[in-house]
Amino acid sequence: MTVLDKADYHKALEPLYKVTINNLFARSVVEQKVDGFVYVDNNETPSTFYVVHPYGMSLLFGRTDNIKFNLKFKDYALNINHIRNKYEWMQTFPDIWDSVLNELFKDYMIKSADNVDKRETGIIELNTRVNFKFNYEKYDSLRKELSFLKLSSDFKIIRTDKRIFQDWRHSN
């Protein structure tokens, strides 16, 4: 598992375009719209990819049977070498990664409910991400159905500007 040079990020584009789950955050890194990292199994002809967005979202995709990459990824995920200083939230594609990761992290994986009160190191917390799709027809139907509801005169809708935003961020 090595960091792909930014000049070679284009090598991840075609495989990323085949990912059918939410991947806009990964695309923003690969397309170099934001800084992030792309880790690969091989710099010349990569087939396994791990893309990390600066806010911590990440995507693991590509070949799942790359044992050398998977073992290095395990060390990275468990932060064995202490190179990460923040949490990462990973998605995988395709679904076969689930069984690969379950085997790889079998001694380190907990369900999120098991770790509610404390955060430990050397563990992988398992959660499930649910992606939603906006249903315009349903929204439009509800909007028409509820059109009789009006805002109370106590409320006023205003555009947020820089001053309002800064004041809001520093309020209790």
Image (tube, helix red, strand yellow):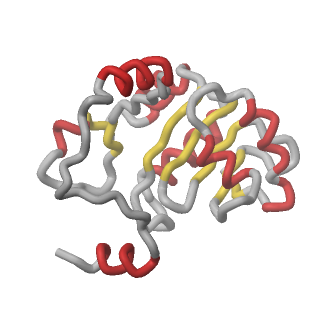
Q: Position of residue 126 (x, y in %)?
A: 33, 36
In depth, the one of 17 and 116 nearer the eye is 17
Q: Is residue 117 above or below residue 113?
A: below
Q: Is residue 139 above or below residue 109?
A: above
Q: Position of residue 139 (x, y in %)?
A: 42, 25
Q: Quadrant of the C terminus?
A: bottom left
Q: Position of residue 114 (x, y in %)?
A: 17, 38
Q: Position of residue 149 (x, y in %)?
A: 24, 34
The residue sitting at the left extreme is 117
Relative placement, left or right, of 22 versus 39 is left
Residue 8 in which image quadrant: bottom right
Residue 108 in which image quadrant: top left
Q: Which residue is painted at 44% across and 58% down in the image? A: 79
In depth, the one of 11 and 166 nearer the eye is 166
Relative placement, left or right, of 171 versus 127 is left
Q: Which residue is painted at 48% across and 28% down in the image? A: 134
Q: Which residue is painted at 66% across and 62% down in the image? A: 34
Q: Which residue is painted at 43% across and 47% down in the image? A: 89
Relative placement, left or right, of 123 versus 90 is left
Relative placement, left or right, of 28 versus 169 is right
Q: Is residue 122 above or below residue 128?
A: below
